[in-house]
Image (cartoon, grey):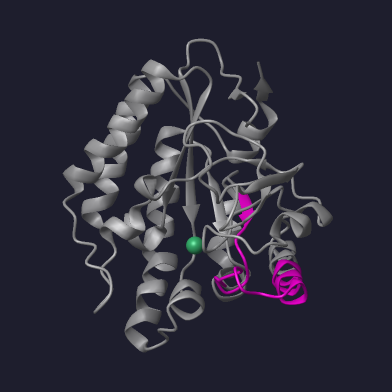
Amino acid sequence: MQRNGKVRLPEGKKVAVNIGCDFDAQSIWDGSFNLTSPAYMARGEFGAEVGAPRLLKLFEKYGIKTTWCIPGHTVDTFTDICKEVVEAGHEVAHHGYVHENPTKASYEEEEKVIKMGLESLAKIGVKPRGYRSPYWDFSPNTLEILEKYGFEYDSSLMGNDLHPYYPRTVEVHSDKANVFTKESSILEIPVSWYLDDFPQMEYITGGQEGQRPVEDIYNRWVSIFDYACNNEEGACYALTVHPQTIGRAHTIQMLEKLIQYMSDNGAWFATLGEIYDNYYED
Ligand SMILES: [Zn+2]
């Protein structure tokens, strides 16, 4: 069984809320979709030139610190805005180099990507405490590599929805029971596809419709937040947004409305690092 993981909250707060900005820019189109035509590069450029500054302005307005998961490729291509993220006091986590899929990578290939990401982040003065897999998936070696490079937390898995936990390696059998083996020393702060703007709102020609009304998304995100407040003690709520998706005019207004709702109803806005620092078990 998982341990009973919780987050210590400041007096009067009901749930720890992390806004995770996955600042993929052009890397996601290249590394994850193999789409490098000018239109897709322009969409990534929009994220860096328009979406990211809008988000920084919004977070400053509400005094919120967030976690930016930045691929090395974004740091190398759009260095100045990444420096602004750091200067504004937001946390930065490792998010691959060019948004690679690690699931089939060899140990050596995956380690190389981790090193490349670390080298790029070092250029903006960041030694990340945490990792978020670009694919929200792992290879069998991912946890071991994260441990080797001194990461403290990961935020890519879904073995829980509202509580941090320590992920275990699963020995998979199809003819008998699966076996959970080693528990990692990396703390998992879980994500959810239902708390991610990209699948619901990002249109990809011939692929993903992404045209859901913002009201639908707002209502779902509020509903999950309300459930956490009313039913789960010491919960954490990890929202994932992408500057090129949430940074559009209609979506950033929805995010602002959500921030206002959460602020009025007991959210403690925290970085993933702060959630890690306040982890406890009972
Ligand atoms: Zn990403």
Q: Is residue 247 visible?
A: no
In which quarter of the view is residue 248 placed?
bottom left
**The quadrant where residue 39 appears:** bottom left
Residue 93 lies within the magenta run? yes
Of the pair 257 and 235, the residue shown nearer to us: 235
Start-end of magenta stretch: 92-116
Provide residue 163's location: percent of width, then percent of height.
54, 31
Residue at the bottom extreme of this rendering: 37
Percent across and percent down for residue 190 are 53, 42
Q: Is residue 166 left or right of residue 108?
A: left
Q: Is residue 96 visible?
A: yes
Classify 60 as above or below 224: below
Number of numbered discs visible in the structure rendering: 0
Which residue occupies 67% across, 46% down?
179
- Picture quarter with the N terminus: top right
Which residue is painted at 71% across and 52% down in the image?
128
Judge from the rendering whether residue 179 lies leftward or rightward of residue 61; answer left or right. Answer: right
Q: What residue is rendered at 53% in x and 38% in y?
A: 65
- Residue 104, image x, y percentages: 61, 73
Determine if the magenta segment contains residue 187: no
Q: Is residue 44 above or below residue 128?
A: below
Is 188 drawn above or below residue 206 in the view shown? above
Residue 13, percent from left and from top: 47, 16
